[in-house]
Amino acid sequence: MVGRLAGLLGLILVMGSGTAVAQMPMEMPATEGEQRTQFRRIDQPLGVKGAVAAGGLALIGLELWWFLFSKPKSQKAESRQGIQEVTVMVDGGYDPSRVVVNAGQPVRLNFDRKDPSSCLEEVRFPDFRIAQELPLNQVTPIEFTPNKPGRYEFTCGMNMFRGIVDVQAAEGGTATAIASVPQSAHPTDQVTHHTEHLTNSTSSVEATMTSAGIQEATVTVAKGYQPKRVIVEAGYPIHLHFDRKNLSECYDQLLIPEFDVAIDLKPDQITTVEFTPAQPGEYEFMCGMKMNYGMIEVRPAKTSSSKKWFSQDSIREA
């Protein structure tokens, strides 16, 4: 910023000095091949000088205001039925770009997208492991519970537009009430809430069991992962086919930490990931930058299915 201001000031000084240089040819001297030139100063009117100087000062003032004094629009969330709620307009950025909430209370941000730019098709909350598509001309609610005070950033899918969730310490009696809830003391609340977010607001699919006893499902990698939840049974091999359509470098790699999977996904190709979950539970998969998430829900094996496959194994052994 300092360099820009210095350059702008130098331009104003040159233009505002009221002088210009003009090149005037002189008569040719007697000696051929020798040419001389003379420079003559031209004075500009006083009114032009003043206009140039005033315009330059105005630009400097605008630069200073923009970089030093301009602050993002801020709004404090209103509590409605125990949920802190704010509507954020998505139009050339986020308005408000700073949302103030209290720690320990559920937050619902309603993103009203009006801007058709592809950059704003998705909003991400890295600290809460949320990546949510924002359909055009629709209001998309995003819910989470911040347990600790701090500043948590949210961004567009390309990290070009940003906003802040300013989480402040709860006041007085509210803090006491929140402290009495047992789960608020656990650091895994954010991940648990994110799991609920995936369950309630994203698509899911049950893997198909093949005749060979392998569970298969296809996940399209486009605007995030679709479906974001894959349901399988414990004890059977899984083949997950990731069909990558999105060229963003965020999707260059796929991670499934609980199964020690870290594999590259090539654009416009299907990459198969194989593993066998032994225990029921919920296991996250994510992009290499840990910005987009999905969930593998492992359920206990069905009794009927288990008998079926055990009987087939017995037949093979016989």
Image (cartoon, rainbow, N blue to C red):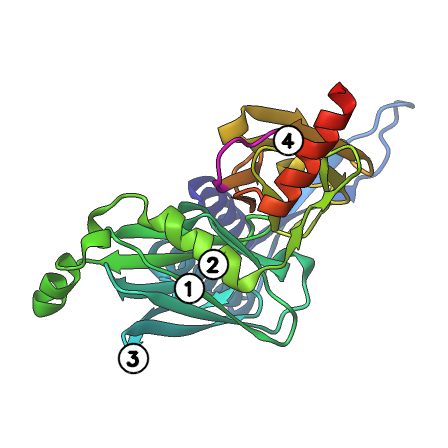
The structure residue drawn at horizontal position 75% and vertical position 35%, both measured from the top left corner, is: 37
Q: On the rendered structure, is 26 left or right of 111?
A: right
> In this rendering, is residue 109 above or below 268?
below
Separation of residues labelled 2 and 1 (CA atoms): 7 Å
Q: Answer whether residue 78 is visible to the viewer in this image.
A: yes
Q: In which quarter of the image is the C terminus?
A: top right
Q: Earlier in the sequence, mark 3 or mark 4?
A: 3
Please, what is the three-letter code of the amino acid marked with disc 3? Gln
Helix, strand or loop at label 2? It is helix
Q: Is residue 279 covered in magenta?
A: yes
Furthest residue in direction top, as rendered: 317
The alpha-carbon separation of the residues under discs 4 and 1 comes to 27 Å
Q: Earlier in the sequence, mark 2 or mark 4?
A: 2
Asked if the residues shown at circle 2 and circle 1 are in contact, with their CB atoms under 8 angstroms apart, the answer is: yes
Three-letter amino acid code at disc 1?
Glu
Tell me how far mark 3 sits from mark 4, CA to CA: 41 Å
C-alpha gap between disc 2 and disc 4:
23 Å
Q: Distance between the residues labelled 3 and 2?
A: 19 Å
Kindly tell me whether residue 238 is visible in this rendering.
no
Q: Which mark is residue 81?
A: 3
Residue on which disc 2 sits: 197
Circle number at residue 253:
4
Placement of 49 over or under 266, stated as above or below: below
Residue drawn at (29%, 79%) of the image: 81
Specify which label sits upstream in the sequence, 4 or 1.
1
Please give the residue where the numbered disc 1 appears in the rendered image: 143
